[in-house]
Amino acid sequence: MIPVAAALLGYAVLLAWAVPVTLARATWPSRAPRAAVLLWLAASAAASLSFAAGLTLATLPLHPVWRLLGALLHSCLRLIDAAYCPTALPPAAAGLALLAGVALAARLGLTGARRYRAVARHRRTHRDRLAVFGTDPAGVTVVPHPTPAVYAVPGRRPRIVMTTAAYDGLTIPQRAAALSHERAHLTGHHHVLLGLTGALAAALPIPLFRATRDHTARLIELIADDHAVAHAGRTALASALVCVAAPAAPATIALDGGDTITRVQRLLGPADRPRPLTSAASIAASAMLLAVPALTVTAPLLLAAG
Amino acid sequence: MTRGLGSLESTVMDRLWSADHPMSVREVHGQLGTDTLAYTTVMTVLTHLYDKGLVTREADGRAYRYRPVRSREAHSAELMSEVLSASDDPHATLLQLVRRLTPDQARALQDILRVGPTDE
């Protein structure tokens, strides 16, 4: 009989391999970007939780260590221990599992803290330099510059910025669409999602976490696009994107705009019918992915209580 | 307290950029309106701008005369250079509306737009 710890670890590895392979190739995410982001995050969370739970269960033979954690956990752990304790596992392996768990948690925590400090400092410096430019009546900071650009600086005192080239080059509906897109990022706190997925991928660059970071970044643009379409219309946003994405005079300033073409095509193509079934299925899948480690660990407690 | 002075920074910088000589606090204060703004407020704003490295100052008797470190164009060019740079933004410091197209991609997009939307 396979110990439950190994099963949970196996589940985590399976998710880490299978989810990026299948979900990255799917076409439905651009029709239901919110539900898709949830599924990516749920898969990453389920893999992380399962791995952590598997490691924790593997450390159960180290009774003295767990006794130190306090009497509060004692009764819960006793029930889980009685149900799952892999007595066949030598204490050395259990100790290794404990070390691995602590190391992973520390890596995640330290990477997250370092990245947060760096990005907060960078944003503060950028905001300070923006402060010397005035804002228009809508609160948009206008920077004199010949290259069109529109962006937002998220954080505690967010700013939406437009260069004069973008401000003057866009019509009023196009400007409204661009602003609505940026505001959607700010009100949705998308920078938090980007920070979390980025830190996870930087700390533990397995395919699942890297794919979650990349696809979340792509999908939040679609979420913001949908928001802008609701406020300003598909044509206004599509033409705003094309205008702002135009190649700049020095040919060296060119990121890869592959995603841009996809977004414009999505806006100009037939309007997607709302697909509540797709969203519901994705949300259900997210819940099920997370339920595996959650129910496995709490089953002894639930059974004892029930 | 920096709160509430944000918009004043842009007004003060605007004065310094428009001027052709370094300005004292009294001069800037005079131009902005002595009845609406306190002298000490203007002095605080200029000090903040100095601390941020946006203006430099030279002593003129007992007072300071302030001038911008960079022209308005140079300042915005430096600001936008990191926004427009080809290197990716791995920490997602800023949220750009759209990624810039390479010339080849722009041509490809024009072709797509010429064909027209796939649905009427």
Image: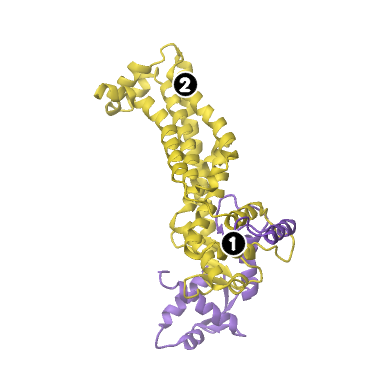
**B120 in relation to A196, above or below:** below
A5, B117: nearer the viewer = B117
For the question of whether residue A290 can be seen, the reply is: yes
Chain of the residue where label 2 is placed in the rendered structure:
A
Specify whether B6 is left or right of A263.
left
Q: Residues within 10 Å of mark 2 (few under 14, many from 20)?
A: some
In contact (CB < 8 Å): disc 2 and disc 1 = no
The type of residue carrying mark 2 is Ala
Report the label total.
Answer: 2
Residue under pointer 2? A7
Q: Residue B38 occupies which quadrant of the picture?
A: bottom left
Query: Residue A14 — which label?
Result: none
Residue under pointer 1? A238
Could you tell me which secondary element the residue under label 1 belongs to? helix
Distance, label 2 to label 1, CA atoms, is 48 Å
Chain of the residue where label 1 is placed in the rendered structure:
A
**Looking at the image, which residue is at 48% across and 88% down?**
B30
| Chain that the image shows in yellow | A
Tell which circle, 2 or 1, labels the residue nearer the N-terminal end: 2
| Image quadrant in which the C terminus of chain A is located | top left
Q: Residue B67 occupies which quadrant of the picture?
A: bottom right
Q: Residues within 10 Å of mark 1 (few under 14, many from 20)?
A: many
| Chain that the image shows in purple | B
**Looking at the image, which residue is at 48% across and 32% down?**
A47
Residue B42: horizontal and vertical position, in percent?
46, 79
Residue B95: horizontal and vertical position, in percent?
54, 57
**Looking at the image, which residue is at 41% across and 15% down?**
A86
For the question of whether residue A206 can be seen, the reply is: no
B1, B65: nearer the viewer = B1
The type of residue carrying mark 1 is Ala
Could you tell me which secondary element the residue under label 2 belongs to? helix
Q: Residue furthest front?
A: B120
